[in-house]
Amino acid sequence: MAIEERLRSLAQTNSNYSLLLAQWEFDKKLLQRALNAVSTTFPHYSLHDSSHSSTIITQIEKIILPDIDKLSATDC
C-alpha cells in the first residue's frame, strides 16, 4: 500500500514518526482479526473482512496517488 509505504518512509527519516508507524502496524494486525469476525456476527452483511478494508485503501490511493508525497505522517 502506497500510504503505508509513505508512513514507513517518513518514520525512517524522522524518528518522531516511529510511534505512529508502530501503532499502525499493531492496529492493522488487531483489526484484521476483528474484521474477519464480522461475517460470523453479521452473516447478512456483504463482505467486510480485511480484504474489504484493503480495497477501500487501494481506491483512496488511486485518487490521491499524484499527491501522496504531500501526506503528513498523521494523514497516512
Image (cartoon, grey):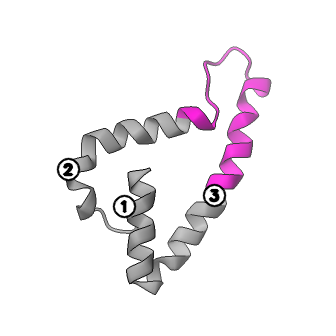
Q: Which residue is mark 3?
A: 27
Magenta span contains residue 56: no
Residue 37 location, quadrant: top right
Q: Amino acid at mark 3?
A: Asp
* Quadrant location, the C terminus: bottom left
Q: Which residue is mark 1?
A: 75
Toward the left, the furthest residue is 66
Residue 44 location, quadrant: top right
Alpha carbon separation for disc pair 2 and 3? 27 Å
Residues at discs 3 and 1 in contact (Cβ within 8 Å): no
Q: Which residue is mark 2?
A: 66
Which stretch is magenta?
27-52
Which residue is depicted at the point 51% across and 39% down?
54
Q: Amino acid at mark 2?
A: Pro
- Image-based side of 70 in relation to 26, left or right: left
Q: Mark 1 or mark 2, which has the lower sequence index?
A: 2
- Give how far across and how far down residue 42 sits, in percent: 73, 22
Principal secondary structure, stretch drawn in magenta: helix
Alpha carbon separation for disc pair 1 and 2? 15 Å
- Circle 1 or circle 2, nearest the eye: 2
